[in-house]
Amino acid sequence: MKNSVRAYAPATVANATSGFDVLGFALQEPGDIVVCRHSDESGIKILPLTGEYKDLPTDPRLNTAGVAVQALLDSMHLSAGLELEIQKGVPIVGGMGSSASSAVAAVVAVNELLGLSKSPVELLPFVLESEKAATGVPHADNAAPSLLGGFTMVHSLDPIDIISLATPENLACALVHPDMHIKTKDAREILPPTVLMETATRQMGHIAGFVTGLYTEDMDLIARSMKDELAEPYRGRLIPGYQQVKEAAVESGALGAGISGSGPSMFALCPSSKVAEKVGESMQQVFQESGMDSELYLSPISQMGAHILD
Ligand code: HSE
């Protein structure tokens, strides 16, 4: 029996502009690492966080990794004593799927340590429990790509039906995280409860165009389809320089740009890694002009989701 297992789960970009709560994709980096060990004490113990970001509770009922692992153990009527060490590389409340990535890494590590043999999709419901605890809604557009890698589509949550989509080879992401926080719960509360039929119809065209563009590797179609008429018209107001960041990204060669998840990070999809470098710099420059420091992450779309490191 293994004494300890280390798992990595990548940061993710949810919504990907046209697919609110439906589309998402995985970055190669940053990501969270969770080390899981057996413990003589019963229950889940979370050690003080290590890594770049540490400001999260260690009470397992208040930490997404703890909530997800508890849900997994409960579902199998297990009462194993487990110790979790979270090395947090994904910024907290940054719009990069941070709550999902530590929960995903934790359930993947526990799955391996206890020999549960669950597939990534079978682990998803437990991560959704933690997403619900963190944001009030069990959205899967961060958890699914973090578990599976690549672009994913949430076709249905009840029953769970997740589709892995095609990922054009050279597509690269520039993601800029400005020095501010937006809680997903708050960013959801400002959205209207209903939309006009004509808005919904246009948005269906955008997501259908985007997914078709992924499969046909039609960069122009991807570019024409990167539009969000559901969330960004409301959430954009929360991010200083939002419109200018989008425009700067496209002027520098991005196919399109938008809010990553519920923000405040903004991302751009680019036809190559080289273009992504230039795009990222111009996005950062706009944030700087709005008086905000930012962190730039450049990454290909990772085909690999969460995995065991050892
Ligand atoms: N789809 C979710 C939202 C993602 O936009 O609220 C949150 O990371």
Image: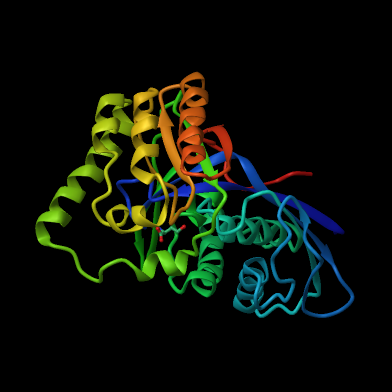
Q: In this view, does 63 lie to the left or right of 136?
A: right
Q: Which of 58 and 191 is in front in this view?
A: 191
The colour style of the image is rainbow
- The x, y position of residue 156, in whole percent, is 34, 61
Q: In this view, does 225 lie to the left or right of 168?
A: left
- The x, y position of residue 29, in whole percent, is 62, 39
Name, please, the residue furthest toward the top.
Answer: 274
Q: Which residue is drawn at 60% across and 55% down?
A: 101
Q: Which of 121 and 149 is in front in this view?
A: 149
Name, please, the residue furthest toward the right.
Answer: 40
**Rendered-image quadrant of the C terminus:** top right
- The x, y position of residue 60, in whole percent, is 70, 75
Q: Which residue is drawn at 40% across and 38% down?
A: 245
Q: Which residue is drawn at 57% across and 47% down?
A: 11
**Rendered-image quadrant of the N terminus:** bottom right
Give the answer, above or below, for where 64 lies relative to 143. Answer: below
Q: Which of 269 and 171 is in front in this view?
A: 269
Q: Can residue 50 be seen in this view?
A: yes
Q: Is residue 159 left or right of residue 52?
A: left
Q: Which residue is drawn at 32% across and 50% down?
A: 19
In which of the image's four quarters is ligand 1 placed? bottom left
Give the answer, above or below, for where 274 lies relative to 45. Answer: above
- The x, y position of residue 118, in whole percent, is 60, 59
Give the answer, above or below, for where 269 lies relative to 207. Answer: above
Name, please, the residue furthest toward the left.
Answer: 198
Quarter-wise, where is residue 21 in the image?
bottom left
Q: Can residue 218 be seen in this view?
A: no
